[in-house]
Image (spheres, rainbow, N blue to C red):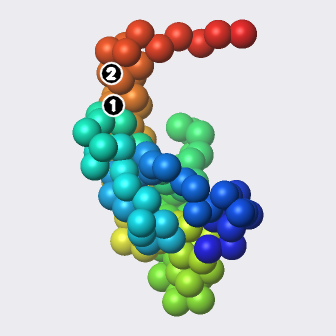
Amino acid sequence: MRSVERIFGYYERHVLVSACERRHPLLPDVRTFHEHGYSDLAISDWLGVVTTPQTPRNVIARLASDIRSAVAVPAVQNALRSEGFDPVSNSSPGHFKNVINSDVARYSTFIAKNNIQLSN
């Protein structure tokens, strides 16, 4: 909750809509874009660790194992939740890669469909 309070401060009570796929536990009264009829505006956020393609598989396996172990600790989960995160301790490098690729494809389609362009 500390992050939400820092981000929104006084304005927390005035958040109009959430881009999350479902209502966020820290903002349970804030409706999502989907609830407002914009189903293609759901945005999932994530936090993870990535490496270079040259990283040896044994190093990736060790990092993944250590990260899963750390995230499984109740105190770590509570700290992450207090900052607005939804900790996942049973993920794998392959699953995370699929999440990233899926998001890139989904956002690319949304950008093209809506003719969104970068501007200076």
Is residue 45 visible to the viewer in this orientation of the structure?
yes
Residue 70: x percent and y percent?
56, 79
Crowding at mark 1 (Cα within 10 Å: few <14, some 14-19, many 20+): few
Q: Label 1, on which residue?
A: 106
Which residue is at 53% across, 37% downward?
53
Q: Locate residue 32 relative to residue 55 in the image: left or right.
A: left
10 over 120 or under it: above or below: below
Q: Label 2, on which residue?
A: 109
Q: Which structural element holds mark 1?
A: helix
Which label was assigned to residue 65?
Answer: none
Look at label 1 and name its amino acid.
Arg
Q: Locate residue 103 relative to residue 74 in the image: left or right.
A: left
Do labels 1 and 2 touch, CB within 8 Å? yes
User: How far is mark 1 from mark 2, CA to CA?
Assistant: 5 Å
Residue 13: x percent and y percent?
58, 63
Residue 45: x percent and y percent?
48, 50
Look at label 2 and name its amino acid.
Thr
Which residue is at 56% across, 84% downward?
78
Closer to us: 14 or 103:
14
1 over 92 or under it: above or below: below
Which residue is at 48% across, 66% downward?
27
Closer to us: 57 or 76:
76
Crowding at mark 2 (Cα within 10 Å: few <14, some 14-19, many 20+): few
* Quadrant, the N terminus: bottom right
Residue at the farthest front position: 14
* Quadrant, the C terminus: top right
**Which quadrant would residue 7 be assigned to in this image?**
bottom right
Residue at the farthest bottom position: 74
Q: Which structural element holds mark 2?
A: helix
Which residue is at 66% across, 58% downward?
11
**Which quadrant would residue 102 be assigned to in this image?**
top left
